Amino acid sequence: MAHSFKLPDLGEGLTEGEVARWLVSEGQAVAEDDPLVEIQTDKATVEIPSPYAGTVLRILVPEGEIAPVGAVLVVVGEPGEAIEEPAPKSPSDTVSQGIRGTPTSDSARVQATPLVRKIAAELGVDLAAVMATGAGGRVTEVDVRAAAGREETTEGRREPLRGVRRVIAEHMTRAHREVPAVTWVEECDFERVEIERLLATVVKAVAESLTEFPELNARLEGDAIVYLDRYDIGVAVQTEQGLVVPVVRGADSSTVEELDVEIRRLAEGARAGALTSEEVRGSTFTVTSAGKLAGLFQTPIVNFPEVAILSIGRIAARPVVREGEVAVRRMGTIAITFDHRVVDGARAAEFGLSVIAQLEGC
């Protein structure tokens, strides 16, 4: 008997996922628990095993398409087994799928992310009248802006946003749109910091300071500020696919040495695409550093729904005045971007100075 495998609920309130990569092909034999498909969520790429043994009879959702939880992704059964063909699409079904390059006729049934729907509402665009060009007839932000008379240039090579890059685009756009952000910057003397353990040292200093500044270890939910009593620090890692933010759990109770080992493990996992969804969710504050590529300082975007992020600027030998004399020290900058709805400027500055005091006193 053929089995239809549906996209499972991947937790954390996720309602959909992108088929990043099929690990099987039609006609291929699979055993129970064999790797079946990679699903990209807004948190991580999750490898899902096959719950059935048999032959892959039909793949229903191609790579690059976004499917809602509960949608049938693939059918597994016996070789040559007849499977029920999808029912012919009625006009209303065509609306829900959204024909590429044609307008739909019912906004409620149009395939579009919540962010795209919000943009459409702000621009006064009826999604039902938008020409859908996204994968599987999905209406994209570009489609909406084009319908609003703000079409961007069509010159050059055009590639759809997929995988981590799509997640980054949606996540950063939402943060930039919803968070009234302010960035505070100050110099820091890194002379006493062991550069090989720079990130671990900064993460430790951040976690210690957050205990004194709880509003930076919080999130805004509706009309309430939620103060978190855990210190799980996200560390931004650049990968070939894009930026990934694995989470260092309990940073306040770990030593710098322990943090260094964990950060290196998570960074290796991020670059190999081997992190679990649990390892990239639930951070309370984020630290980012571009290393040798860092400019003098950055103005990072808050990792929503967090309310603050710290970035480390370029560290180099510079002349500074110490006790009335010019000395060469290893100097850099610390920048704090914060959500001004939750954090006052003075408190953000005090937090930054607290972190710097710990780093300079190492």
Image: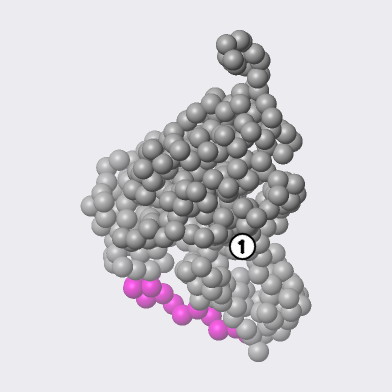
Whether residue 359 is visible here, answered yes or no, is: yes
Task: Please name the residue that numbered disc 1 is placed on.
Answer: 277
Tell me residue 302's x, y (percent). 46, 45
Q: Give the range drawn in magenta.
A: 82-94
Q: Quadrant of the C terminus?
A: top right
Camera-side residue: 310 or 205? 205
**Residue in the picture at 48% in, 59% down:** 228
Q: Residue placed farthest to the front in the image?
A: 323
Residue 189 location, quadrant: top right
Whether residue 306 is visible here, answered yes or no, is: no
Tell me residue 305's x, y (percent). 45, 54
**Residue in the picture at 27% in, 46% down:** 148
**Would you say residue 84 sits in the magenta stretch?**
yes
Camera-side residue: 40 or 100? 40
Give SS at disc 1: helix
Question: Label 1: few (<14), some or many (≥20) within 10 Å?
Answer: some
